[in-house]
Image: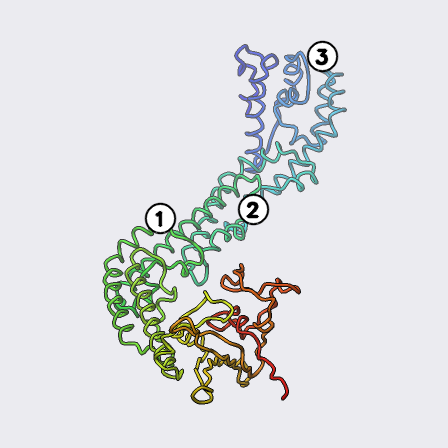
Amino acid sequence: MRAATSPALAPDGSLDRNGAARQAALEFLRIVADRLAASGQPLEALPGDTVCERIATFGYLDIERLEWAVGLPVEYWDRPFTEDLLRKAQSCKDGRTVVRLLSQSYPDIEKRRKAALWLREERERLLALPLTLTSFRETNGLQLGGEELRRNGVTRMAHDRFLGAPLDPRRTEMEQAAARELREVFGGDSLEILPLNEARSQCDRLVGTPWGNEALSRLYKTCTGMAEDYVAKSVRQVFQEQAGRIEAAPKTFAGLEANNWFLMGTGDVRGIYPPAALVTEFNGKVADARAEAVRTATGEVDKAFAAADPLSDAPASGILQCGRGMIPSHESLRPLAQACQEGSRALAARRDELRCQEALKASGGGSGLLEAALRPKAAAGNSFRVRQLVCEAARQKVTVTFPTSGMLWWSKQYVEARLPAERGRDQVRSLRWLIEPVADAKGEWAISRLESKTGEVTLPFPEVGSSSYRWMPSKRHPHLRPHGGGGRDQEPPVSAATRCLPWGDDAVRSWGAPRRRRAA
């Protein structure tokens, strides 16, 4: 310590004229003094009889030069020491300057002494803390907060001097202990205890927010690295287990359905999507098993649809429902998805054809009538096949029959549509129209009028016989639309009942409402 106060340290032999050398000597003096004080050894200033000689080497005098002159930092100047220095300085050539400087600076000297004393006490307290993650977090990495420093009149420079470098060994030791605790957290938890999407947030809970704190920032970075390693390791483990289950699963339709169609499932990792390299590795590992299962399942699907009863009322089995979008869109599953779609369409076509044949048989229409065409009387160009009418109606659960009345020349032919009952109501709803053969068109019948209506079937349109009606295309109904005077350009609302008819609302409109018979 005495060597640190030698003027010979300066290149030109004078610390007064070399500020950098003087500052370096003063910093060394403070380090040595702080270490001696920390170890409990007594501190002594330079011999008093040399103070005047050392002061005389300065052309300008301030507290820092006075520290160097007496060989003891001001943080260790108590009142008795300062008063003794005043007495010795009075005999110096510049004694009055020294006395005036000490008198003016003593309040600041005392403040620095008290701050240093408090910092040394805090250092002892921090050194006594256990080496744990909690200690490291709660002390901000063995550092004091700015508010606490201001409250005790401590500068950041003084904090770093007493609690910075002196605590670095203990700080490193405690940081290493905290890192070990973090490794235990991420190494011991499982996905059930620590979900992957919550791994990184554990660092906020365990370490805290490291705003501007270098020590906590290092530990936080260490924690997030462990969290990312935990996620990567867990994701790989999950998908390795999935691949194992796929390889052991039956290579059948049921095996595919029960194992996510042999695709990588991210549900087990709760929103963490795996890296591309892992996806490629997974698909390569299960590719053969998936291809084998798809081939087998495609054959199962073809057999199931071929053997299915189109008219069965029993709930369809899972394999017969595979054409309803249940198979994911993946290149390797395309043959299976295509087989399901084709099987569903073929089964639906068979069902429609059988229902059509049943409906035609139950309609009571002769072969001549069923092969004929039917059109609204007022729209000669808009005819449709009677067979088509019956079959399309059957698809919508509307029963079409062809009752007759009278005999010979008085015989009348009708077409009747029985609509499905509304939910919660058993009331029969039906419409009956009189149809007549078209004189100048063989095999064509025309709707004459709506003969009767049973149940609540709303027909919000006038009779077709009105002279103000003609039929034109419309946007809503591309085939027919009433047009004429009296506001009939506006289409009235259409009931749900008439909308379900296979030939549409417009045809119903065109056939008109029942005519009232005149009283005899």
Q: Considering the numbered disc 3 on the image, is that residue within a helix, a strand or a loop?
A: loop
Percent of width and height locating residue 22:
58, 18
Mark 3: amino acid: Lys
Question: Residue under circle 2?
Answer: 209
Question: Residue under circle 1?
Answer: 276
Q: Label 2 near label 1: C-beta < 8 Å? A: no
Quadrant where the C terminus is found in the figure:
bottom right
Q: Nearer the viewer, mark 1 or mark 2?
A: 1
Q: Nearer the viewer, mark 3 or mark 1?
A: 1
Q: Nearer the viewer, mark 3 or mark 2?
A: 2
Q: Which comes sooner in the sequence, label 3 or label 2? A: 3
Percent of width and height locating residue 324:
38, 66
Q: On the rendered structure, is 301 left or right of 384?
A: left
Mark 1: amino acid: Ala
User: Residue 263 versus residue 179: which sits nearer the camera?
Assistant: 263
Q: Which comes sooner in the sequence, label 3 or label 1? A: 3
User: Residue 127 versus residue 508: which sits nearer the camera?
Assistant: 508
Residue at 45%, 48% (x, y): give it. Answer: 179
Q: Considering the numbered disc 1 on the image, is that residue within a helix, a strand or a loop?
A: helix
Q: Residues within 10 Å of mark 2 (few under 14, many from 20)?
A: some
Mark 2: amino acid: Thr
Q: Residues within 10 Å of mark 3 (few under 14, many from 20)?
A: few
In the picture as drawn, the residue positioned furthest to the top comes out as 12
Residue 93 numbered mark, or none: 3
Question: Which image quarter: residue 318?
Answer: bottom left
Tell me how far mark 3 sits from mark 2, CA to CA: 58 Å
